Image (cartoon, rainbow, N blue to C red):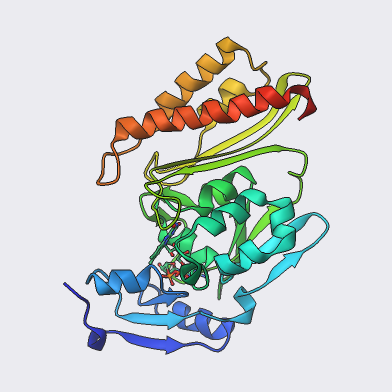
Amino acid sequence: MRGDPEVHELIAASSLPEVLAQLGSAPGMWMPIAGGTELMVAHAAGRLNTPKLISVWGLPELGFIRVSDDCISIGGGVTFGQIRRHAAIAADFPLLSRAASWIGSIANQNRATLAGNIVNGSPAADAPPALLVYDAEIELISQRGSRRLPYSHFHLGYKQSVLEPDELVLALHLPRRFAKHAQYLRKVGTRKAMAITKVALAGTAVVDDGIVAEIRLAAASVADRPVRMTAAETALLGKKLSFETRRAVRKALLNEVRPIDDIRSTAEYRRHVAANLLDEFLNELTREGSSV
Ligand SMILES: Cc1cc2nc3c(=O)[nH]c(=O)nc-3n(C[C@H](O)[C@H](O)[C@H](O)COP(=O)(O)OP(=O)(O)OC[C@H]3O[C@@H](n4cnc5c(N)ncnc54)[C@H](O)[C@@H]3O)c2cc1C
């Protein structure tokens, strides 16, 4: 049933301290709303249970992209439209740029924010696999101060995270050290646009003289949250890309993924597509061989 706008209160904050004070005054009572592309859908479906909303849309303190020598920091309020148009992000983090270009439609990308994508916590969201294979750090802020942790530690389970009710996502920090890595991202969906991911796999790797010297793998829609594929990584690290290694890695991945059956796909299909995407990435690494 459609939500009733009468039961909701919405305030628009003019500064970050104002938002933090409001969130801190009654933790759990107020919910931040940024682009609203998740929350307005929830409202329309009668699933928006928090009556009090505080808008963080357009706050300059969340809307920055900062490029330094060793890092690009992206404010939580930055939209996917801004991300896909940013030259330094496209150059250093092409997987994030590409993921941004897949999110909904252009209109959607102009409202959808990075923090909203992460905090919503969908296992199928497009940004998380890229953030995971780039070793992103997430910075959270409240009136109590700020804290920074590996993004891989943020999600705890289905729509569960370490975010406290009085905290906001201030920024994502991406270390600029992937220029020489082989990089891979593929999303399998029903269509090329406006499609929720059935399975996605991202990877960054360094192969040195035929040996896998560095490997990061992350996937969407194969577990209750966006995940790093650590068992598959372990099966690859320090190994030659031989037939035996590839067989062991495929097996590790198939044991590691925990997808579900839903209206978009079956768990079985997701498992096998995830393994096939991994094969595709390993084919690329094998082709590029020691030049990577
Ligand atoms: C038509 C359509 C198509 C879509 N297609 C895709 C797609 O292809 N891929 C995909 O991944 N997603 C897709 N989405 C989902 C959505 O657009 C994204 O998840 C978007 O990034 C959410 O950002 P938002 O700013 O709109 O979040 P909001 O709806 O404003 O908020 C979502 C959640 O994030 C919280 N939040 C927002 N900002 C902060 C912050 N700074 N700190 C703490 N919490 C915060 C809110 O409290 C809420 O819990 C689609 C949505 C629609 C409606």
- Compared with residue 218, is residue 143 higher up or lower down, i.e. above or below? below
- Compared with residue 157, is residue 17 higher up or lower down, i.e. above or below? below
At which x and y percent is residue 187?
48, 44
Q: Name the residue rendered at 75%, 59% in the picture.
A: 88
On screen, residue 260 versus residue 285, left or right, reads left
As drawn, the residue found furthest toward the front would be: 192
Along the viewing direction, whichever of 27 and 160 lies nearer the viewer: 160
Q: Name the residue rendered at 77%, 23% in the picture.
A: 290
Quadrant where the image shows the C terminus = top right
Quadrant where the image shows the N terminus = bottom left
As drawn, the residue found furthest toward the right would be: 69
Q: Name the residue rendered at 31%, 34% in the picture.
A: 267
At which x and y percent is residue 235?
57, 21
- Compared with residue 135, is residue 169 higher up or lower down, i.e. above or below? below
At which x and y percent is residue 101?
55, 58
As drawn, the residue found furthest toward the top would be: 244
Q: Note whether residue 150 is visible.
A: no
Q: Quadrant of ligand 1?
A: bottom left
At which x and y percent is residue 124?
41, 49
Along the viewing direction, whichever of 139 and 193 lies nearer the viewer: 193
Number of residue marks: 0
Q: Note whether residue 93 is visible.
A: yes
Q: Name the residue rendered at 36%, 71% in the picture.
A: 39
On screen, residue 205 versus residue 224, left or right, reads right
Q: Quadrant of residue 177?
A: top right
Along the viewing direction, whichever of 285 and 169 lies nearer the viewer: 285
